[in-house]
Amino acid sequence: MKLIHKLTIAIVFGITLVMAGNALFQVRREAELFDADSSHDQHTVGRVLRASVQAVWRADGEQAARRLIADANESNTDLTLRWVSLEPDPAPADAPEVPRERLPAVLAGRESVVRGRLPSGDERRITYIPVAVDGIRRGAIEVSESLSPERHFMRATELQVVATTALMVMLCAGIALALGFWFVGRPMQALCEKARRVGEGDLSGPLVVRQRDEIGELAAELNAMCARLAATNQQLKAATEARIAALEQLRHADRLKTVGHLASGVAHELGTPLNVVSGRAKMIAQGMVSGDDVAENARIISEQAARIAAIIRQLLDFSRRRGPRLGPGDLRPIAGRTVELLATLARKRSVTLDLEAGEGPVTAEIDEAQVQQVLANLVVNGLQAMPQGGRLMLRLDHRRATPPPDVGGETADYVTVTVEDQGTGIAPEILARIFEPFFTTKEVGEGTGLGLSVAYGIVREHGGWIEVDSRPGEGSRFTIFLRPAPEQALREALG
């Protein structure tokens, strides 16, 4: 129920109570006044008639007094006047309308008023005025009046009061509704609409409420809140853009750092095909080959040039800076390219790189370039942790797992990439800090402390996480959990 309706009901209820109480008081007061007036009239008539009856009785006797009462009754249309006997067994014509047992005051010589219903069903008010002549109680004058006019008057009064009350209630309800809509309903509707737009993120357009009351103050505070929220949103947007830019620069710097590690290996990889190209080209230039051998040497030169171009392209693709683009991707070729790219660096450190990918594609919702950066960072980290050489394994698999509390989510199937080395391992006291930016335990020149931090951030942006299992002297195992690609997106990607 709306506030204006509640206020109107409360006001109408209060007015109804007041008007009903006033109406009840007014009806009772009118009834009391009507009854008092009627009783006063009966007493006045009775007393005047009693004085006349006593005088006539003394002068002319009882019959003259009775005739006086009869004449007075005929001349009065509103009251019925009778002479009644107070003897125990009076004549039927002189018997009072009310039984003797209800007239103890009259029998004691005092005036009395009683209400009685006649055999005809008419309810009347009856006043008894005792009459004494020469000190002898002779009887009483009975003055009676029908109560029908009083009932009609009270019914008319009640109807008038009810009609007046209903009219006042309806008038007050209409005024309350109109004023409530204008001063409460309309501005509250505007406040609700403004709050709804704020909830949807629309902070534009001030709320205009031209009232100098609590609702006006609320509207002013709401406008001020929207202004502060808009300013805060702008600050957050600028801070977020700056953070994203810094994060991208951080990742790019880490990528270039890895490229630096690969530089010597790439130079070695380029040396062999360049020597082949140079030797074959000299042989052709000096005329040392002819006929079909020229074509064969040209083919060998072309193959080696393509090999050089492929190596350079891999390095450029890895170092190129671009934003994340998530989509269904197969991890097998990504892992394969990473192994190829880091094979020379591994050989220089006497480390054997192995890849276990199983059969068929291993698809996840990923950005391929960023995931390759993650794998490269973890592999390089493993190579640096193996100064005595050994074996480093990349393994692709599926696993059902429950995300950690900081990631959230239900138990589900995930794609996993495990990088396991046989290096020096990680001490328990520093295991919780390995993903902190710029934290490193390597020698100067071996690392900047960005590799694992960047890898952790990329995986978290993919909706996954990294688990670490390491013991000093026994090597380390990093397991990346990634969300599998949706079936619909996978079918679209595969055509």
Image (cartoon, helix red, strand yellow):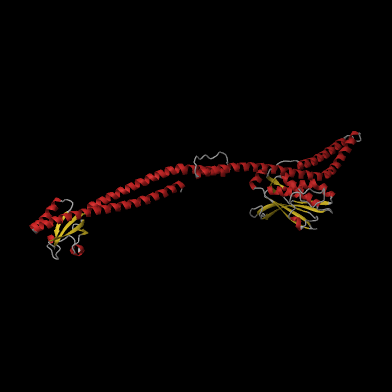
Q: In terms of image quadrants, where is residue 252?
A: top right
Q: Residue at x 29, y 52 (%)?
A: 29
Q: In terms of image quadrants, where is residue 198?
A: top right
In the depicted view, which residue is nearer to us: 208 or 254? Answer: 208
Q: Quadrant of the C terminus?
A: top right
In the image, residue 122 sits, relative to residue 320, either above or below, namely: below
Q: Residue at x 46, y 47 (%)?
A: 3
Q: Residue at x 73, y 42 (%)?
A: 249
Q: Position of residue 484 (x, y in %)?
A: 67, 49
State whether residue 12 appears in this view.
yes
Q: Position of residue 325 (x, y in %)?
A: 69, 43
State whether residue 196 appears in this view.
no
Q: Is residue 33 left or right of residue 49?
A: right
Q: Position of residue 330 (x, y in %)?
A: 71, 47
The outermost residue toward the left is: 60
Q: How many numbered discs?
A: 0
Q: In terms of image quadrants, where is residue 224?
A: top right
In the image, residue 205 sits, relative to residue 411, either above or below, namely: above
Q: Position of residue 444 (x, y in %)?
A: 82, 49
Q: Is residue 411 left or right of residue 129?
A: right
The outermost residue toward the front is: 134
In the depicted view, which residue is nearer to us: 185 or 141? Answer: 141
Q: Residue at x 27, y 54 (%)?
A: 32
The outermost residue toward the bottom is: 88
In the depicted view, which residue is nearer to us: 45 or 222? Answer: 45
Q: Is residue 449 left or right of residue 326?
A: right
In the depicted view, which residue is nearer to us: 172 or 401? Answer: 172
